[in-house]
Amino acid sequence: LTATGEAGGGAVLMTKDVQRVNQTAKESGQAAQTYLVTIPPDIRPGMQFHVNVNGQRFMVTCPQSAKPNSKVRIMLPTRKEPLAAPKTQVFEVTVPAGVRPNQPFTLMANGQRVLVTCPPNIVPGQKIRFQLPVQQVVGGIQLSYESEKGGWMRTIRAEDLKFQWVRTKKQTGKDAKNGDTFDVDVAGMESFDFSKSAYVRKITFLEGNDAKMRTGLLDLVPAKDSNVDSRLVYQNKTLLSYADIATTQGKPLEEKTQWFQSICAQLTTPWEEGHIKIVIRRRALLSDSVDAIMALGRDEMRKRWRIEFLGEPGIDAGGVTREWFQLVSEQIFDPDFGLWQSSINNQMCMQINPASNISCPDDHLVYFRFLGRVMGRALFDRQLIKGHMVRHLYKHLLGWPITFEDLEAQDEEYYQSLKKFTTMEDLSVMCLDFTVTEETLGVRQDVELIPGGNMKEVTKDNLSQYLEANLRYRMLDRTKPQLTEILLGFFDIIPEPALTIFDANELELILCGLPTIDMDDWQNNTIYSGNVESKGKRSKVVEWFWQTVREDFDQEMKARLLQFVTGTSGVPTRGFSVLQGNDGNIKKFCIHGVDRKQYVYPRAHTCFNRIDLPSYSNKKELYEKLKAAVTLSGTGFDME
């Protein structure tokens, strides 16, 4: 049994004892976790001794095979936090028309978006009751972004208060208070649709042979089958609940970040309870850093770190640590190192090199686990890394839905070829099977998308399976071992429930920082086409656009606009004059004028850095529609 199908970075063959631990955890529905403890000098086999783990005291019996001063692995009993009986509020709602027994639908209850499943033997028009805990008075909670027409959104399940992704249609009610119902797009969730289907990564954590190095299984599941806890308990204390997450999610990014940092501060081990000193040689920066960080156990990843460069005087008051994060991330993202490569669509964004095992045949996965820990620690300490990743990798970190639009952002040509198949009547002329061709160092080979794929012809009947298999391969399977290690390292530090307040664009801005944008350089290196080609920057709607960006958008919104149009918040070191498109050639920022009747909101084409700007009648309308489009750009919602 292996985690990723190949050794390295903790993904190694599990011993029978470890397999037994993971099986027990699976049967109990708990996450597998063990701890290494040292047998005291005066303890012999069969004798008992006390250990302190995560602020809790346990009695342990020394195994027969253990000796004094040796280390043994223990698995702690599950201890649930004693909770006071929560105050609850009963809600009564009418089952909306069109909802069948056992079918989910969403509604607003006490200002909170809730997912309810229609009970058996209940028909539309009948009333049902359910109750929710009232943790605090909350007004206007929005558990996820949404648009006028709906889309994929994260909501809370009434049965267990876990967050779950659902696809919604337009609001059916008119009252936005208690009992207001929303349509769940059951067809959009259950059946395949090229424009609507979405998938979310699912990682199952498992114990590895080395208690310091957890392993796990990674898969891509339909978005509706994905869920995440809305509650975080640490050392027998609840640090956050779904109400905390819901109230924080709608706040500005800086306030979200401050709230997140307050959670991290509570997870940080006090200095007097242990800290880590890391000494690095500059001439061996990356190798020393990997050795040091990978030698740490998970219980040490949240201790305070003190980083020093060998032979350099001075106390780390923040500058040395900041420099270290920049230098190690810059080296590991360097395409010449072979682990990452520039995205086909955007030279500013990095994607995982599927052939990274060729560049580092013995330990490439160790570097990805190391990078996951570095990114997690950077987020934990509010440090910055030097490397912008393709958008779907931020979504994988957050557990956000992946759609075919993410494939389009990564490889426009590949996306268009798949989309073409959805309109063809006779697929037999294409002679397709369930394989893709990969080329590595000039050697071409066919990769099966499903078992026996080279023997299965693509037909109209199985086209949806073929398209889904392609999306799964390009977005996950192609680099599954590497991505598994990144996620394992990242979650050694960061608790997933605390991430639910961020979207993918915000995560990039937090990890990479807000860019320094020269507005004159940006505006001077913009071209115009469509309805505004003749007048260019003298066009009224263009004047309003630049006035809005310069005067009304703060630094964060300017960065979000860049993300919306170019796919990343990164600015080329030589400025906007060398902005590249998906073919590697210069593709300057472009404002393309379109008729207001054609689109309500601006649209972006990240492949060639173009924004389609409707001919709005006034600056206020432009500001409102542009801000809405930019804010919702990374969330997968319908903007038509």
Image (tube, rainbow, N blue to C red):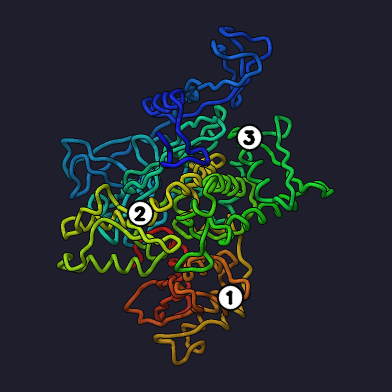
Query: Looking at numbered disc 1 in the image, what kind of residue is underneath it?
Result: Arg
**Residue 428 picture quarter:** bottom left
Describe the element under mark 2 as helix, strand or loop.
Answer: helix
Describe the element under mark 3 as helix, strand or loop.
Answer: helix
How far separated are the C-alphas under marks 2 and 3? 35 Å
Question: Contact, CB < 8 Å: mark 1 with mark 3?
Answer: no
Q: Which residue was labeled with disc 2?
A: 473
The quarter of the picture where the C terminus appears is bottom left
Q: Nearer the viewer, mark 2 or mark 3?
A: 2
**Residue 16 picture quarter:** top left
Q: Does 314 appear above or below 440?
A: above
Q: Which residue was labeled with disc 1?
A: 550
Q: Nearer the viewer, mark 2 or mark 1?
A: 2
Q: Can you name the residue that lies furthest to the bottom here?
A: 534
Query: Looking at numbered disc 3 in the image, what kind of residue is underneath it?
Result: Glu
Q: Nearer the viewer, residue 105 or 309?
A: 309
Residue at image position (33%, 54%) is 447
Locate residue 311, reporting x and y percent.
82, 48
Describe the element under mark 1 as helix, strand or loop.
Answer: helix
Q: Nearer the viewer, mark 1 or mark 3?
A: 3
Could you tell me if residue 622 is visible in this image?
A: no
Q: Does 528 appear above or below 413?
A: below
Residue at image position (35%, 66%) is 414
Q: Nearer the viewer, residue 73 or 156?
A: 73
How far separated are the C-alphas under marks 2 and 1? 41 Å
Q: Which residue was labeled with disc 3?
A: 300
Q: Does 412 appear above or below 616?
A: above
Q: Residues within 10 Å of mark 2 (few under 14, many from 20)?
A: some
Locate residue 607, reporting x and y percent.
43, 72
Locate residue 279, reporting x and y percent.
74, 43
Q: Residues within 10 Å of mark 1 (few under 14, many from 20)?
A: some
Q: Earlier in the sequence, mark 2 or mark 1?
A: 2
